[in-house]
Image (cartoon, grey):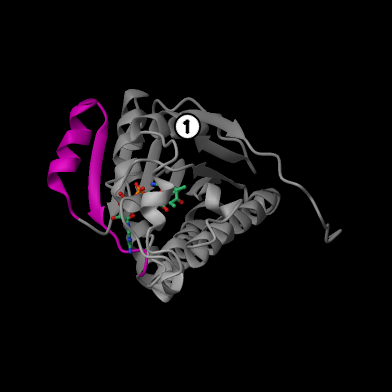
Amino acid sequence: MGLANKTIIFVAGLGCIGKDTCKALLKRNVKNLVILDRLDKPEILSEIKKVNPKSNVTFQPYDVMAPLSESCKQLAKIFAEYKKVDVLVNGAGILDDHEIEKTIAINFTGLVNTTTAIMNFWDIRNGGPGGTVCNIGSVTGFNAIYQVPVYSASKAAVVSFTQSLAKLSKITGVKAYTVNPGITATSLVQSFNSWLDVEPCVAQKLLEHPTQTTEQCAESFAKAIECDENGALWKMDLGTLEPVKWTIHWDSHI
Ligand code: NAQ
């Protein structure tokens, strides 16, 4: 998918990976970039806008933990304004295994709700035009960091949900894929709690191994969005972008 003239909604576009990915998208001349995030960070927004003054970049406060009905109302306003939205990026995430319910609510339920809400506008069964959902999973959704089992499981849930969405695209007309970063130098991984404090030094131990920069991750991220491949599982690790082949252990045959 060429990104020039496309309209993209980016949930969590003001985070560390989000910000640099927004910049990479603007370098590709995205027409409209609608950033939704819980935190209002005007300085980051103006830094993003400077990358390409020809692109229209807007921000709206958005909490993925809001009820589904609220997400629907907010998306209705966005669709009323832009008419056509091509891509939804779901990127909200927290890493704190002391916060069990919040982790599931933000990393998984919030992503499911935003996706469910946009189906009202995209589903071809309602006369919609289709679209693409790009969900930020994690390599921990493939193989857990077992010291943060709640976070890892929330990301495995994102991977699983998105694989189903991709299979449903024949019915809904909506494509879906995950982008799964490896360890990326952001504030998220600098210091975090393990489950039941099983490993108090989990962040330090993790960061002893090679990581990638947010700029490297963002470049892979933008390339994955350009590929627009339904059902893809993209690994974005150590500055590379690779498709992951999923092993099938069982088939429902329906
Ligand atoms: P950062 O904390 O900067 O970004 C999190 C974003 O989520 C922010 O924009 C924040 O405002 C938004 N957010 C949080 N709660 C929200 C809510 N209720 N409503 C709306 N927005 C909310 O961290 P980041 O590293 O840039 O993370 C961005 C995404 O990448 C997250 O989904 C994160 O899980 C994912 N990710 C990050 C990393 C990493 O190393 N930084 C990795 C994989 C995926 C492999 C590695 C891990 O899984 C961590 C161990």
Secondary element at image label 1: loop
Give the labeled residue for mark 1.
238
Q: Is residue 78 above or below residue 231?
A: below
- Identify which residue is drawn at 32% across, 44% down: 186
Query: Is 136 placed left or right of 95 in the picture?
Result: right
Picture coordinates of residue 71, whole percent (x, y): 37, 64
- Identify which residue is drawn at 29% across, 60% down: 62
Q: Which one is in front, 169 or 221? A: 221
- Identify which residue is drawn at 57% across, 61% down: 157
Q: Is residue 128 above or below residue 241?
A: below
Asked if residue 51 is among those painted magenta in the image, a careful observer would answer: yes
Q: Residues within 10 Å of mark 1 (few under 14, many from 20)?
A: some
Q: Is residue 171 above or below residue 217?
A: below
Q: Which one is in front, 140 or 198? A: 198
Picture coordinates of residue 145, whole percent (x, y): 52, 56
Give the magenta range.
40-65
Name the residue at the right extreme.
Answer: 253
Name the residue at the left extreme.
Answer: 43
**Looking at numbered disc 1 in the image, what kind of residue is underneath it?**
Leu
Q: Which one is in front, 81 or 195? A: 195
In the picture, which quadrant includes the C terminus?
bottom right
The answer as to whether callout 1 falls within 8 Å of ligand 1 is: no
- Identify which residue is drawn at 83% across, 57% down: 251
Asked if residue 113 is among those painted magenta in the image, a careful observer would answer: no
Residue 221 in view in this figure? yes
Query: Is 97 placed left or right of 27 in the picture?
Result: right
Picture coordinates of residue 217, whole percent (x, y): 41, 34
